[in-house]
């Protein structure tokens, strides 16, 4: 199945002994089949909560408002049995650390067969053939030998390839890659980026790439959502985000990336201040306390969402359409 | 000027004993070079970036320099004096400091920040007139509020834990700081903070530093000189800007090209390098990089290249360095130190 993903006004709160943590607030997002969506932000921005909500894996102390529509389904209203049926069939997740994605005491082959448990229509031999095909697609040529290996016998890059193969074996309509290259070396990172780009040519579903690494987002994505303290502050075409960013946070984040400067800098740029507490949020704009362009309405009123073009939206008092 | 620390042909080998070998007590177990004849010098006040993929031996080199691993061959000199015995290394560690990779894990979870900061004085049995005051002044030095003395490590954010790590490393005013991945796992905005802090304190306390990392984008802004490692061997050294502008070793060039560019208009279509770093247990014959090298030739498979010192304070370990493609290596001299400043020098450093 290929379907669009529409997130509307999604808010997630975690109930904790120290009060309610408002981890995600009024998030709107849209992804069409065949698109690669990037979610970028620093730690604490809510990108993990968003991904967990999309994969239906939120813990019991989370309360959800708003809707996540995938095709005709509303993912937030599903019961546990339907959620389970969706995960690993329609929705697949590639995690940051491929070591923890696999069971250390089963061979790769056995686990890849298990990942296809929802395919009642084909037998074990066919499943093995599918695995060999899929491993070849992710650049692993000696599939038979690899299937007999245990996860610890593979290198990090190889494990990440297998994790991607595992995700694709389920024919997901929604593939979520959460920091897929963070645990890898640059040379392997480049290869995984290359692989994901090759794979998307024949993949018709939605791919969501979550990363704090701007380079990875720029290399891979069509559209980007920039998150800060639980909110989407800016969204748009990847070119607009990297070349025509309007939100002060997006600009500051881009300016911080040392990869943008080829001459040696005496001081590296930073964003002064720190993230607001998610239990006691500022009344106005969440970024106002750190914003260099802050003016009168910012600390008092939440910013409006300004549409700059069909795809480019920014929530900032200072933005002009 | 005497370098702060030098390593001369430093090697670390270890024997891999399988269970069957141990039980049967058969032939001596095979030995593997984790570090193979690494020669480096760090001048006072200099910042050296030690760069390589995981498995290249960069952390092993850093640890061996401070005596945390035993070298099997070669020599370490600290401020000109050879370092051999354990008491020698204690002296080295007294004057140097290491920041380990994981900042939270390197702080004991059961001690408060105040105690953690003053621990170096206790270990070195150094007088401290007032523990709390010392801790507070160290915190102030790294821009943290004095109230942090009462905190436990788990109450710190990643960036704050790094700052405590910096404060502790610099407590005894070392002449050498070795920082192993000082910004791994930090957000870009905080990464800049920590590196700026180290740079400021460097101005103030005048220590030499070695930054061990695989983050090229970062190291280009904080280091004066680069040393690139591959499979336990140095493949290239030189002034940072020169190495980035015109890398000599194909491996350095591929590393630089592999770094993702934060600009969707400049997406890379082709891969600079394929495959993975081989295991030291199966070190390729000849040049260890030939299995992945885009310009490898017959000679590379057959013979191990030796270090060559080139003009501009650069060394490279490649039969066909990128700028001098096709030129036959000339054997001129055996000490590359002499070649500094001379032009067009190609010096055979050591044939292996």
Image (spheres, rainbow, N blue to C red):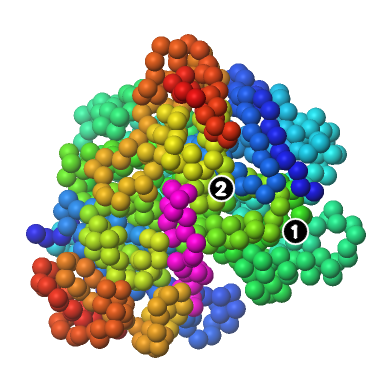
Q: Residue at x 14, y 82 (%)?
A: B333
Residue A217, image x, y percentages = 52, 47
User: Looking at the figure, which quarter contains the C terminus of chain B?
Assistant: bottom left
The reply to whether residue B213 is visible in this rendering is no
Residue B175 part of the magenta-drawn span? no
Q: Mark 2 vs mark 1: tell me if same chain.
A: yes
Subunit of label 1: A
Q: What is the tally of numbered marks visible in this picture?
A: 2
On screen, B325 above or below A4?
A: below
Instruction: Give the residue number, with chain letter if any, for mark 1.
Output: A169
Is B211 displayed left or right of B275 in the figure? left
On screen, A60 above or below A259?
A: above
Q: Secondary structure at mark 2?
A: loop
Magenta extent: B258-282
Instruction: Give the residue number, with chain letter if any, for mark 2.
Output: A221
On screen, A88 above or below B319?
A: above
- Tag 2–tag 1 contact (CB < 8 Å): no
Residue B245, image x, y percentages = 27, 61
């Amino acid at each position: 199945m290929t379907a669009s993903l529409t997130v509307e006004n999604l808010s997630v709160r975690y109930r904790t002994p120290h009060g309610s943590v408002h981890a995600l607030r009024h998030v709107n997002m849209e992804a069409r089949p065949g698109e690669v969506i990037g979610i970028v932000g620093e730690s604490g921005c809510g990108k993990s909560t968003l991904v967990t909500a999309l994969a239906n894996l939120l813990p019991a102390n989370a309360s959800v408002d708003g809707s996540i529509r995938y095709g005709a389904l509303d993912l937030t209203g599903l019961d546990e049995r339907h959620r389970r049926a969706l995960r690993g069939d329609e929705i697949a997740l590639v995690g940051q650390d491929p070591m923890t994605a696999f069971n250390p005491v089963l061979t790769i082959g056995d686990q890849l067969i298990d990942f296809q448990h929802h395919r009642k229509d084909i037998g074990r031999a066919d499943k093995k053939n599918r695995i060999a095909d899929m491993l070849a697609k992710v650049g692993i040529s000696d599939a038979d030998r690899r299937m007999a290996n245990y996860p610890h016998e593979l290198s990090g890059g190889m494990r990440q390839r297998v994790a991607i193969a595992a995700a694709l074996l389920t024919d997901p309509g929604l593939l979520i890659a959460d920091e897929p290259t963070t645990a890898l070396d640059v040379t392997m990172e480049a290869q995984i980026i290359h692989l994901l780009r090759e794979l998307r040519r024949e993949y018709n579903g939605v791919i969501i790439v979550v990363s704090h690494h701007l380079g990875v987002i720029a290399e891979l994505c069509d559209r980007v959502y920039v998150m800060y303290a639980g909110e989407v502050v800016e969204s748009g075409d990847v070119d607009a985000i990297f070349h025509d960013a309007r939100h002060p946070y997006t600009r500051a984040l881009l300016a911080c990336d040392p990869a943008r400067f080829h001459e040696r800098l005496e001081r590296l740029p930073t964003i002064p201040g720190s993230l607001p507490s998610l239990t006691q949020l500022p009344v106005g704009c969440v970024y106002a306390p750190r914003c260099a362009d802050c003016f009168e309405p910012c600390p008092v009123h939440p910013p409006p969402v300004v549409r700059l073009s069909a795809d480019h939206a920014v929530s900032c008092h200072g933005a002009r359409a | 000027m005497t370098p702060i620390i030098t390593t001369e042909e430093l090697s670390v080998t270890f024997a891999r004993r399988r269970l069957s070998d141990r039980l049967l007590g058969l032939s001596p177990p095979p030995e593997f070079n984790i570090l193979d004849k690494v020669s480096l010098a760090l001048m006072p006040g200099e910042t050296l970036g030690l760069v390589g993929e995981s498995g290249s031996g960069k952390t092993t080199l850093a640890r061996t320099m401070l005596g945390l691993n035993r070298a099997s061959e070669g020599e370490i000199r600290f401020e000109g004096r050879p370092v051999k015995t354990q008491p020698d290394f204690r002296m080295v560690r007294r004057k140097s400091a290491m920041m380990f990779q994981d900042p939270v894990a390197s702080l004991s979870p059961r001690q408060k920040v105040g105690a953690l900061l003053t621990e170096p004085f206790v270990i070195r049995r150094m007088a401290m007139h007032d523990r709390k005051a010392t801790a507070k002044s160290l915190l102030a030095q790294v821009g943290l509020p004095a109230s942090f003395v009462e905190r436990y490590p788990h109450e710190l954010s990643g960036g704050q834990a790094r700052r405590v790590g910096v404060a502790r490393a610099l407590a005894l005013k070392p002449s050498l700081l070795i920082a192993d991945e000082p910004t791994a796992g930090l957000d870009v905005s905080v990464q800049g903070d920590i590196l700026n802090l180290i740079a400021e304190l460097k101005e103030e306390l005048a220590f030499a530093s070695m930054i061990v990392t695989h983050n090229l984008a970062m190291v280009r802004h904080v280091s004066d000189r680069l040393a690139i490692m591959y499979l336990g061997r140095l493949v290239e050294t030189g002034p940072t800007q020169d190495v980035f502008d015109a890398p000599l070793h194909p491996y350095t060039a591929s590393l630089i090209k592999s770094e993702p560019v934060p600009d969707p208009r400049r997406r890379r279509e082709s891969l600079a390098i394929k495959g993975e770093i081989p295991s030291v247990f199966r070190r390729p014959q000849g040049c260890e990089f030939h299995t992945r090298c885009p310009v490898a030739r017959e000679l590379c498979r057959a013979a191990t290249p030796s270090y060559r010192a080139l003009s501009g304070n650069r060394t490279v370990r490649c039969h066909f360095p990128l700028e001098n493609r096709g030129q036959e290596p000339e054997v001129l001299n055996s000490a590359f130190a002499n070649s500094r400043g001379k032009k067009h020098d190609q010096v055979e450093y050591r044939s292996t």
